[in-house]
Amino acid sequence: MKVNYQIYDHGDEVLLAACDNEVLGRTLKDGDINLKVKESFYAGQKIEIEALKRKFQTSTIANLVGEKVVDAAIESGFGQEEDIMIIEGVPHLQIVRL
């Protein structure tokens, strides 16, 4: 199963943006929160979940949307369950490694 991802290099920082196919292009809303899952930000390439897990090892920042990519981050020890935000029923996880 493939998901969408994009890598952004900024000096020493490596930002990984990834989302499930089902949420790409949607705007998720919950109260004052509006999260736009833009194709221009998340849809650079397609990748299998196992290969995405390897990308977590080299990423210093991540913006993840969707059950599959967020679950992969948790399973890999890259993120923590208590940091998951649910927006319109969809998991969202932001990670910054210090």
Image (tube, rainbow, N blue to C red):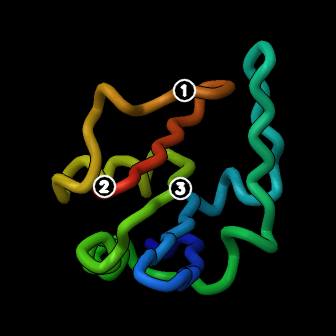
Residue at the (19%, 59%) spot, across then down: 76
Report whether 89 appears left or right of 32. left
Residue at label 3? 63
Q: Which mark is residue 32?
A: none
User: Callout 3 environment at 10 Å: few (<14), some (14 to 19), or many (20+)?
Assistant: some
Q: Amino acid at mark 2?
A: Ala
Q: At which x and y percent is residue 17?
A: 56, 66
State the image quarter where residue 35 is shown.
Answer: top right
Q: What distance separates the C-alpha of mark 1 from that of mark 3?
A: 14 Å
Report whether 56 appears left or right of 23. left
The correct choice, above or below, for 77 with respect to 16 in the image is above
| Marks 1, 3: nearer the viewer | 3
Residue at the (47%, 82%) spot, across then down: 47
User: Callout 1 environment at 10 Å: few (<14), some (14 to 19), or many (20+)?
Assistant: some
State the image quarter where residue 24 is shown.
Answer: bottom right
Q: Which mark is residue 86?
A: 1
Q: Quadrant of the N terminus?
A: bottom left
